[in-house]
């Protein structure tokens, strides 16, 4: 009987072709996955924090009446991470699933149960897609791993949008607060992703 099979050369050529295709497509697949994780965790963080503030509002009343709200310039607790941690413990932690929290200098640092985290300084919240990134320089942020959110007694919790007047084009242009979404100035990137329906579009500076 005659048996037909691939030769060694044919097999090696086939494996080589598969390897080339994998090398070309794998980076794209990895990037797509990273973007999906980033968007999912950003959206979850925004929702969790907004709900926590709203729930606490039912118990403690209007936001502007909370203790040392926003840690304003006149507050003796401004810049004190320990006091900010106590503030979080009173108002937000009862409504947030977290696995660790500590103070570091002027910051409070929090690890969330889904692997992400945030550091907070006064009314600013520096969200980390991966909690390990929260251990870096606290106010560093970029277009992939760390994003800025804010809280105010007027609008509640939301992506940082200082100086923004409402159009998408503005988010790519330096505004009155000297912030935009670019590879060199990423303060408005969380707002851009939210504006786009919690999606990272092709023109996003990934």
Image: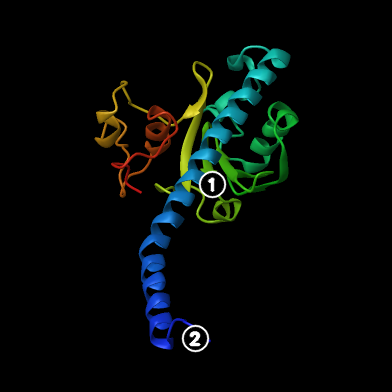
Q: Nearer the viewer, residue 47 or 28?
A: 28
* Mark earlier in primary sequence (1, 2): 2
Q: Residue 2 carries which label?
A: 2
Image-based side of 170 in relation to 190, left or right: left
Across and down, in percent, residue 77 comes to 61, 34
Q: Residue at x 58, y 43 (%)?
A: 118
Task: Find numbered disc 1 in the image and state the secondary structure of the residue it sits on.
Answer: strand
Q: Alpha-carbon distance for marks 1 and 2?
A: 63 Å
In the rendered view, would you say 17 is above or below 93?
Answer: below
In the foreground, 141 or 28:
28
Q: In this view, does 14 lie to the left or right of 115?
A: left
Residue 140 appears in the rendering: no
Under circle 2, the secondary element is loop
Residue position marked by numbered label 1 in the rendering: 128
The quarter holding residue 59 reads top right
Labelled disc at residue 11 = none
Is residue 116 at least partly visible in the picture? yes
Q: In this view, does 148 lie above or below 67?
A: below
């Amino acid at each position: 009987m005659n048996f037909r099979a691939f030769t060694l050369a044919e097999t090696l050529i086939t494996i080589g072709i598969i390897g080339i295709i994998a090398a070309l497509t794998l980076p794209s697949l990895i990037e797509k996955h990273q973007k999906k994780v980033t968007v999912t965790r950003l959206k979850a963080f925004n929702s969790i924090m907004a709900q926590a503030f709203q729930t606490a509002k039912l118990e403690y009343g209007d936001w502007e009446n909370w203790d040392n709200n926003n840690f304003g310039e006149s507050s003796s607790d401004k810049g004190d991470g320990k006091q900010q941690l106590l503030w979080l413990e009173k108002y937000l932690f009862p409504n947030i699933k977290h696995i660790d929290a500590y103070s570091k200098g002027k910051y409070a640092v929090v690890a969330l149960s889904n692997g992400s985290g945030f550091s907070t300084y006064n009314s600013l919240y520096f969200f980390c897609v991966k909690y390990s990134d929260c251990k870096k320089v606290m106010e560093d942020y970029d277009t992939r791993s760390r994003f800025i959110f804010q809280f105010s007694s007027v609008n509640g919790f939301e992506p940082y949008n200082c100086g923004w007047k409402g159009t998408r084009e503005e988010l790519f242009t330096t505004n009155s607060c000297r912030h935009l979404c670019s590879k060199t100035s990423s303060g408005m990137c969380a707002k851009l992703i939210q504006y786009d329906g919690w999606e990272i579009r092709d023109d996003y500076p990934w």
